[in-house]
Image: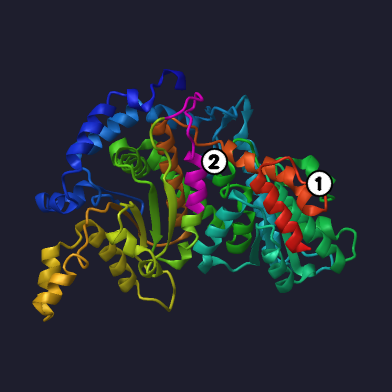
Amino acid sequence: MTDTIKPLKEQPAWLPLVRHRRVMSELSLRSLFERDPHRFGRFSLEHDGVLLDYSKNRVTGETMELLVDLARQCGLEEQREAMFSGAIVNTSERRAVLHTALRDPAETPLHVEGENVRAEILETARRMATLVGDVRSGAYTGVTGKAITDVVNIGIGGSDLGPRLAIEAMAPWADGPRVHFVANVDGWEMQQVFRSVDPERTLFIVVSKSFGTPETMTNAEQAMAWFARHVSDPEGLKRHFLGVTANTEKVDQLGLDAGRVLPMWDWVGGRYSVWSAVGLSVAMAVGMERFREMLAGAHSMDRHFREAPLAENIPAIMGLLSVWHVTFFGARSHAIVSYTERLARLPAYLQQLIMESNGKSVDREGRPVDWPTVPVIWGQTGTPAQHAFFQALHQGTETVPVDFVGVASAVAEDAGDTALVTANLLAQSQALMQGKSADEARAEMAAAGLPSERIDELATARSCPGGRPSNTLLLKDLTPHRFGMLVAAYEHRTFVEGVIWGINSFDQWGVELGKQLASGLMPALAEDAELPDADSSTRGLIDRARAWRG
């Protein structure tokens, strides 16, 4: 399929878009709104309590028609269907990409290379529900007979960021065991866990597809050693440590119970895996009913992405706008600002989802690409972000597209001011779009009674250029259902980007290089061994680190 698709710059829509970009760069966003009083209605979409307003982007109807044409020419509709149907979409690893199947309630067979994966998905969900129900009810106890009060998730990357984000987003429903996370190997997170849990009441979940990820296995072994020092029963490790992995042999080698392993599959990438047994800690915290609601929300967005025409498709439009900003306007970063602390981890989650997926410089055929691909993803929650980096967004020399994520309903039962939060979100997107001219700044200062010489001094400093693009994603509420929709929308947005740029969004070979080099440097750092054959910088840093460590 990919052999027949031309590179991006050879698509018929490429040159018209390049020419159109020159025209659009001369137009201000403010003028586009002044020309069209119905612009919001023309450039907004809504599905199942999620609204995307993309009217504050430098686009017209012609822009969107050209971008949709480009998507079709790049084979977006065909590749979308290939992904959902279980075809080999991850070409470099020869794997299907079926995280969407994890949240599809259908029981019809779904075959990957002749195997019905639907049956295994359903069986895993059944086992997961039984385990979660037993732990939350107290039927599953520790080896000394005490109920489980704490769960520790040991993982990294997608085995950590997804569950962390989900539990924070669904915190109002977290009525089960307290959940702790350990990802970093510097020891700090692990030490905090040791200080706050009772080993006899704690369940550890070790999450690693290979059960060989160095950081995860190091942390798991430290946790097992700590547990063994406090609980002498030889059956304790098997009772208090569970595995989520595709490698059951490694579970046996670690001394855990292979019968209590929940599976991961090659056709689910780590950064897309929170919907699987990787989300076990999430289900422990909020219960299977809420976990299923999260899956249902994601499935609602899946159906919308698969079935809605591209011009009326929220993830498709989000992805096409990203391509418009990055590839045609040269945007080098993209800010994510969510106006609730329950989504504080969303920027970090999306950094991995988007940058690990699309941080590629070769296409699916291994050829270098000569157009920009992924921007740097970053952000923070509003309103604190407004007192941190918004100065640069409004008046800096870089134009940074922004995604504003807001919630129309209250996110805390008896605290907060929803109207004030929403007013700030809307005001910031409005200010980025319209800016403030020097004349407007002069008039404002004159009305405040400033002397004319002071007005002359401050007119340019107090003006804002405007024309800064943004999307607003407004959720009706932040329920598990709506949270699932939000995350699925960004997953599909990432897929759309990858298709247009011609890259494989589902491998991450660049991550492996650092891992390989780290394993070679470990001996020299762990003991007084000969310095490795490396560059002078690396050798010098190893020498200094050893000396300072004594």
The residue lying toward the viewer, choosing from 459 and 119, is: 459
Residue at the bottom extreme of this rendering: 449
Q: Is residue 324 visible?
A: yes
**Where the C terminus falls, by quadrant?**
bottom right
Secondary element type, mark 1: loop
Q: Which mark is residue 530?
A: 1
Q: Is residue 54 magenta?
A: no
Quarter where residue 228 is shown: bottom right
* Residue hosting label 2: 99
The kind of residue tagged 2 is: His
Mark 2 burial class by Cα count in 10 Å: few <14, some 14-19, many 20+: many
Above or below, 100 relative to 111: below
Q: Residue 398, how many percent across, how many down?
A: 32, 52
Q: Residue at x 67, y 58 (%)?
A: 153
Residue 35 position in % (x across, y down):
10, 49
Q: Amino acid at mark 1?
A: Glu
Per the image, label 2 sits on a secondary structure element best described as helix
Q: Which residues are magenta?
A: 349-369
Say whether disc 1 or disc 2 marks the residue closer to the N-terminus. Answer: 2
Q: Quadrant of residue 77?
A: top left
Residue 126 in the image: x percent, y percent? 65, 48
